[in-house]
Image (tube, helix red, strand yellow):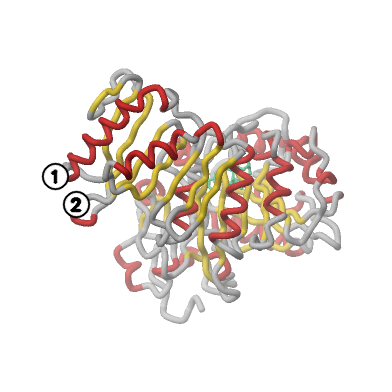
Amino acid sequence: MIYTASSSRVRAIVPSDQRWLEMLDAVMRRMGIPVRDCILGDDRLVVTVHGQGGLPFSLVLEPSKRGQPAFREIGPFALSYHGKQQLDQPDMKVLLLFEKIVRRLGDRIPRKLKGFAALVHDIKDDPELVLRKLFPFVTVERSAGPLGDSVEVLVRTTSRCNQACPFCSAPTHSQPAEDIVLACARQAAELLPGATFSLTGGEPTLKDSFQAEVREALAQPGLREVQVQTNALAFGTRIDPRNLEPADRLSFFVSLHATDPATYDACTGTTGMLQHARAGIDELLQAGHRVTLNTVACSLNVDHLETMAGAIPAGTGGRPVEWHLSALICPHDNPAAEGVLVRYSRLVPAVLRATEVATERGIRTSSLLSSTHAAVPPCVLPQTHEVDRRWLLDENREVELPPDRMKAEGCRGCPENKRCPGVPAAYGRRYGLDELKPLVRGSGE
Ligand SMILES: C[S@@+](CC[C@H](N)C(=O)[O-])C[C@H]1O[C@@H](n2cnc3c(N)ncnc32)[C@H](O)[C@@H]1O
């Protein structure tokens, strides 16, 4: 059972075995700690408070680990603070008060800090931020286009996977229990109406509750679409996709990085699984589901893309397959991704040739621009390239470039600058930024 509360002052998601968090929150507030939110997740408790000078900072409690520096050891816990280099006197008073409360509550706080629970007080905040705070395994991606803004809520329902793609960009989180994911679907529908809710991972089909999670998301009229990001192995081996009723609001975004067994093995870090993935894709199509195949274009498959375009399943008239080609994201916590980068001057022609072959077969492909971060800058595509604006970065929100992306000095003058994701920082370090040339105003329109 989950206790949820939402009023104009607080939003809470607290499973019955985590009620201690509510008690801690109440004690802190009674003792005068200006709590903004208390978040339990990924084996730690983070309490963010209003600090001096209007600057928030966080008090972090984790099971103590040998050699890990901390402000204080309190029984089984290490206490530290984040968000401010140095605490001035009033902030230090808050930290010491928190230490006192933790000492006093002692055994009532579980030693391992497992599971997820959250109380967010400042709910005047951006609803997206509130959702991400309530569910730390969620990321939100926004994009803009002629049909308006799109919001995608990516929910990492598990970090377990049955493949080991060397370039995997997924962050690792503790696994949220089924009822937390169900609560997440309800809160996403309420906080971000019209959003796409994407179950991803890891491999979301590995969770016993996978089908229940899909059904609960579909039951939320506030969610525009429910997407399952999967490698489809489960549908070729153990889950009958007919268990889920096909619907326009339900789609499967299936990774297929090659149609040749050796390249597939290299891209997925596995052996002999291509036949199961293909069987899974066939099952999804035969069940009448909407399927988009996603191929991450990298050095492992770049020379295979054109052949692949002739070999991917085309789907049926009622439900034709779409083919999405992604550029490589290089997350800072997976340095191996950098090892399979390929220069855009080689990648782009290969993708365009593959796209042509697929188009001739009646398969709709989406532009290399049509992801948020897994996209290439528009200037590395031929200017005659049809710009599909649906998934470009939103102009108003992504003004600051994230630290793992890079742009050239000249990009400032480009009319696409505010919507362009630049290149992965690892790409810039390896190949330089000479390929980036500001577009002439109007040329990308
Ligand atoms: C991390 S996977 C998890 C879902 C599922 N296990 C799968 O293989 O599709 C989510 C999506 O990210 C894509 N992906 C993984 N690593 C990537 C990278 N480095 N750059 C771009 N896309 C990536 C995958 O192809 C997949 O479409």
Q: Are marks 2 and 1 in contact (CB under 8 Å)?
A: yes
- Number of marks drawn: 2
Relative to 379, residue 77 above or below: above
Q: Quadrant of ligand 1?
A: top right
Mark 1 secondary-structure assignment? loop
In this picture, residue 275 sits left or right of residue 229: right
**Residue 366 in the image: x percent, y percent?**
64, 62
Furthest residue toward left: 89
Residue occupying image coordinates x 32% and y 40%: 28
- Amino acid type at circle 1 is Asp
Which residue in the structure is indicated by mark 1? Answer: 88
Q: Is residue 138 in view? A: yes
Q: For the N terminus, give its image quadrant.
A: top right
Residue occupying image coordinates x 76% and y 64%: 360
Query: Callout 2 environment at 10 Å: few (<14), some (14 to 19), or many (20+)?
Result: some
- Amino acid type at circle 2 is Gln
Residue occupying image coordinates x 42% and y 57%: 9
Q: Earlier in the sequence, mark 2 or mark 1?
A: 2
Q: Residue 66: give its label.
A: none
Is label 1 within 8 A of ligand 1 (CB to nearest ligand atom)?
no
Q: Residue 52: give its label.
A: 2
Relative to 194, residue 439 above or below: below
Q: Is residue 307 in view? A: no
Quadrant in which residue 69 is drawn? top left
In this picture, residue 378 sits left or right of residue 53: right
